[in-house]
Image: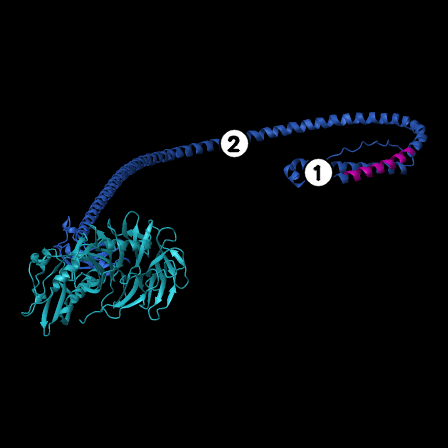
Chain colours: A cyan, B blue
Amino acid sequence: MKPVFQVKSKILTLLFFTSGLMLSTAQANLVIEISEGYENALPIAVIPFQVEGVVAVPEDISGIVSHNLRRSGRFAPLANNALPSRPAQLENIVFEQWRSQDIDHLIMGSVTPRPNDRYDVEMRLVDVLRRQQVIGKRWRDVPRQQLRQVAHQMSDEIYLELTGVPGAFNTRLAYVTMKIRDGERNYTLEVSDSDGHNPQPLLRSKMPIMSPSWSPDGTKLAYVSFETGRSNVVVQNLDGTNREVVADFPGINSAPSWSPDGKSLAMTLSKDGNADIYIMNLQTKALRKVTRHWAIETEAAWSVDGKSIYFNSDRRGQPQIFKMELDSGNVSRISFQGNYNANPEVSPNGRYLAMVHSNNGFNIGLLDLYTNEFNIVTDAFLGESPSFAPNSDMIVYAMNRDNKGQLAVVSVDGRASQILSVADGQVREPAWGPYRVQPNK
Amino acid sequence: MILFIKRHPIAVSLAVVLHLTLGVLITNDWFKQADAIKVNMSSDGPSQIDEVVQRQPLQTFAVDQQVVQAQVERIKAEQEARRKEQERLAAEAQRNEQRLTQLRRDQETETRRAEEARRQADIERQRQEAERQRTAEAQRQAEQARKTALEAEQRRQQAEKQAREIAQAAAKQRESEEKRLKELEALQRQAQEQAAKERARQQTITEEVKQQEAQKRQLEAEALAARLMREQLEQESLVKRLAEEEASKQREAARQREMLSLRETYISSISAKVRENWRTPANISPQAQCELVITQTPSGNVSSVRTENCNEQATPQFKQAAESAVLRAQPLPRPPVEELFERNIRFVFKP
C-alpha cells in the first residue's frame, strides 16, 4: 500500500461514515481501558487525600494519581476499600499494617482550600520498607482548573522516583475524533490531558483533519485540513489563535513535522508533480526541496539533532524507511524487516524509530537505533500513526478494533498497553505532546 | 769390574797371585839367561853353549789386555833378538862342537870316577851318621819314657785329686742342685699354683668378662629389641596418628564441605527469598547485577542492606529495588545449622 494511497484510503474510510449519525457538540472524554500491565507491578497504596475544611474539592487528586499509576501498567494501587487505614500524618502510619498488605509505598496528602477557588496541595511518598518519606511536596494556591495538572505532576514525580524515568502524565494528546451526527461527519481536532480528560477542541470541521504535529514548545500544532476541499497544511496556536495556512500548493500538502528547533516544518508536497519532501522555514515560508526522486517520498520525521530526516519512500517498489542527512543529501535505507514500513517517528530520546510495519497486517514496529534490534510492539490490530510520549517510554498509536477507530498506548517494551476510545465516535491521528510547562509549585 | 772383584774376591786374588808368580818366574829366567850368556861370553875356555830355550808363548790369563799385548810384543822382540843371537852363536858353537866333544869325553870319564869316590864316601858318612842318630835316638827315647812316666804319675795324682775335688764339688753341687731343684720345684709348684690360680682367676675373669659380655650382649640385644619394638610402636603409632590425622582432616574437610554446601544452601535460600520478593516498576536491564550486602539479626530481620560492586547496567532503581527485595524478604530464612548463621551476608543478585 503506497502512502499516498494510504492517505486516500483514510479519506475514503472516513467518508464511509457519513450517513445517519448525529454530530455531538458535547465534550466526550477518551475512555481509557487498561488492557495489559506488568506481571510484577509494584503494590502501592494511594490514600485518599485529606481535605482540610468543609469545602468540597472539585478534583479527586489521589484518584487521578492512582489511575495514572495503574494505567502505566507498572503499579498496582490498592483499592480504596482494601486500605487497612487512612493515616493523614507520617506519625500515624503503622508500618506493619502496610507490610502485611505487601505494600511497599504509600502516597498520602492533603488538599487545603484557599480563597478564590484556590487550593494548597501536599503530597508525600513514603517507603514502607525503609520507613521513611521519599518525596514531600507542596503546591500552593492552585486554581481549580489546574488541580488535575497538579495531580499529573505528582504522578510524574512518583513515577520518576520509583522507575527512574520521568513520567509522561503531565502531558497532552492531540487527536482527531469523528462523530457522525445528522448524517454528517463531524471532525474535531482535540487536545486533552494524557489521561483523556479535559479535552479541548481546537478545530471542528465537516472535512477530514489529519496529521497533527506538536511544536517542540507545546504551544502550537501543525495539521492537515481538508476544509477547503483540498489538503492544506495549517499551523495554529493551542489556544486557537494565529491560525495560518502555510502550505496550499497544488496537489498534495500533507504530513507536517516540526523540526526540533521549532523553526521549520517538513512536509510532503506534490506541487512539482511528484510527492517529495520539502522543508519550510516558518519565518520566511521559504521552501527547500529535500528529496528529488520519481518515487513517492512522504511522512518526514526529524532526527533529535535536527540534522537528518527519516522518511518513507517506495523507491524500492514498496514503502521502506530511509534516512537523509540534510547537509550532504546522503540517503540510506533504514528498515529492512518486512515488506512494508511507513510513517516513521523518532523517540524524543533519539533511541527508537517507531514505524507502521506490515508483514501480514499492520502493526507498530520499533527499531532500536542503538542496537539495530527490531521488535513489533503491538498485536493484531490495524495500527498506524505512532507517536512517542515525551519520556520515550510509551507510544500512542491509532488502531481499528471492532471496526472502530481507537487509540492505544503501549510501552516500548510492549508489556503494558491501554486503549483510549470515545463512546460515540471514532478517534484517530494521535500526537503525543511534549512536557507541559510546570505550574507553580 | 769392581762389582766382579767384589763378587769373586778369591778367584781374583788367585788370578793376581798367579800373575805375579808368573811375572817373577819370567823375570828370573831372563836374568838367568842373561847370566848364562854373560857367563858363556866371558868364558875363555870352551864355552858351554846352552840351548836357547824355545819359549812357549805365555799362557794368557784374563789380565789387562794392554799389559798383555805390551808384554807379548816385548817378548816377541826379545825373542827375535835372541833368535838372531842364537843363530850367530849356533854357528860359532858348531865350530867349537868337535873340540868340545873331545874335551867332554875326557871330562866325563874323570867325572865318573870322582863321582864314584864321592858316592862311596857319602855312603860311609851316611852309615856313621845313621849310627849316631840311632844312639841318640835311643837315649832320647829312654829319657822321654822316664819323663812320660813321671808326668803320668803326676797327672794321675792330679786327676785323683781333681776327681776327689770334683766328686766333692759334685756332691755339693748335687746337694745344692737338689736343694735348688727342690726350691725350684717349690717355686715351680708355687708358680704353677700361682699360674693355676692366675689361670683360674683369668678363667674367672675371662668367664666373668664373657659373662659380662654375654650379659652386655644380651642387654644390648634386649635394648636393641626394645628399641626396635619402640621404634616399631612409634612407627605404628605415627602411621596410626597420621591415618587418624588424615581421617580427621578428611572428616573436617567433609564437614567443611558439608558446611560450605550448607552455607551455600543457606545463602541461596536467602538469595531465593530475595528473588521471590523482587519487583520493580522500573525498566531493568536483564544484565543488571549487584552484590547485596546484608546485615541481619539472628531472627532474620535486616538491620541494613546495601548494594556493592554493581555493573554498568545497574541503575539506581535497580539498586533500590534489590534492596527493597531484601527488606521485603524479612525475616530472612534461618540457617540449616545454627552455627552457620552469619550476621553479614553477601551475594550476587540479578533480576
The answer to whether mark 2 and mark 1 are in CB contact below 8 A is no
**Quadrant of residue B122 in the image?**
top right
Q: Are marks 2 and 1 on the same chain?
A: yes
Q: Could you say where residue B189 lies in the image, as x and y percent from the top left?
A: 32, 34
Question: Relative to residue A28, is residue B209 depicted above or below?
Answer: above
Q: CA distance from mark 2 to mark 1?
A: 52 Å
**Quadrant of residue B150 in the image?**
top right
The residue sitting at the bottom extreme is A115
Residue to which mark 1 is pinned: B16
Neighbourhood count class around disc 1 (C-alpha, 10 Å): few under 14, some 14–19, many 20 upward:
some
Q: Is residue B156 magenta?
A: no
- For the residue pair A309 and A15, the one nearer the viewer reads as A15
- For the residue pair B30 and A236, the one nearer the viewer reads as A236
Label 2 vs label 1, nearer the camera: 1
Report in which chain the residue with disc 1 lies.
Answer: B
Q: Could you say where residue A180 lies in the image, as x and y percent from the top left?
A: 19, 57
Disc 2 marks a residue whose amino acid type is Arg
Would residue B287 be seen by someone viewing this image from the given angle? no
Query: Where are the magenta residues, as a range?
Result: B68-87
- For the residue pair A316 and B25, the one nearer the viewer reads as A316
Q: Could you say where residue B178 lies in the image, as x and y percent from the top left?
A: 37, 33
Report in which chain the residue with disc 2 lies.
Answer: B
Whether residue A329 sits left or right of residue A260 in the image: it is right
Magenta span: chief secondary structure? helix
Q: Is residue B71 magenta?
A: yes
Circle 1: element type = helix
Residue to which mark 2 is pinned: B155
Whether residue B251 sits left or right of residue A106 in the image: it is right
Disc 1 marks a residue whose amino acid type is Val
